[in-house]
Amino acid sequence: MCWSAEADLVAGVVVSGFGLACLAQVRRAGQLPLAALPLVLGVHQLIESAVWLGVDGRIGPGPAQWARTAWAVIALPLLPALVPVGVLRAVPGAPGRGRRTALAVLGVLVAAALAVAVATHPVTAEADGHALSYAVGVPYAPVLIAGYLLAAVGSLLLSGDRVLRLLGVLTGAGALAGALLWRLAFASAWCALAALVSVVLLRWVRQDGRPGAALLSARRVPGRAGRSGPR
């Protein structure tokens, strides 16, 4: 992924397929924001395929600018709000709701600042080896990136759900790898790596989605047995 227009196109189709499968498995309204994440990431890869075409000169400057802006809208304002708010809705009864709420508020604030940057600065992209480097003119970029990752990865790690915690570990590792290996291409690389864990969300959405559901079920069995015994 992120190696060429063709690679992003194939990756986008595959990840979008996972996204449609996730949405088809949804059983609770609270699951919808996170269940939609793989489809969002898949569309993101398809858009980046168009960005590659613009960098390669295979489409005109107008469509290329639209592709870069659409890519930035998803990567910058949308994801840091969607993930923590989605976690908050997905696990409403799990312990630590106050911390998840604080991370959701942080994500919305970061998203608002990034939305202003995207709206007021042209988005540029250039090839950096086999990845793309984007520039938006984000003020206080290190602070906003730190808030972005804290809100998105932190909310998953504090979700109280085993599968979502796994997703947080994988996404955090992907962010670290992107920062170490690609540096200026961090955003592009991290979004591609995050798309790879969409299969984890498919696993999550197939389960009940309530943290501790198995434990609660196990606790109910002895209770039922006790009530059915001699009185």
Image (cartoon, helix red, strand yellow):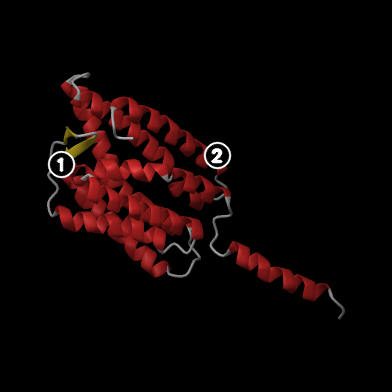
Pointer 1 local density, CA inside 10 Å: few below 14, some 14–19, many at least 20? many
What is the CA distance from the residue labelled 1 to the residue labelled 2? 35 Å
Label 2 element class: helix
Classify residue 53 by image quadrant.
top left
Picture residue at 42% right of the left edge, 38% below the top: 39
Indicate the position of residue 209 as horizontal and vertical percent values.
54, 55
**Residue 209 bears which disc, if any?**
none
Label 1 element class: loop
Classify residue 42 by image quadrant.
top left
According to the image, label 2 marks what residue?
A: 24
Which of 185 and 46 lies nearest the eye of the viewer? 185
Indicate the position of residue 122 as horizontal and vertical percent values.
13, 36
Of label 1 and label 2, which has the lower sequence position? 2
Q: Looking at the image, can residue 43 be seen? A: yes
Picture residue at 43% right of the left edge, 48% below the top: 33
Instruction: Identify the image quadrant of the C terminus.
Output: bottom right
According to the image, label 1 marks what residue?
A: 136
Picture residue at 16% right of the left edge, 45% below the top: 117
Which of 175 and 87 lies nearest the eye of the viewer? 175
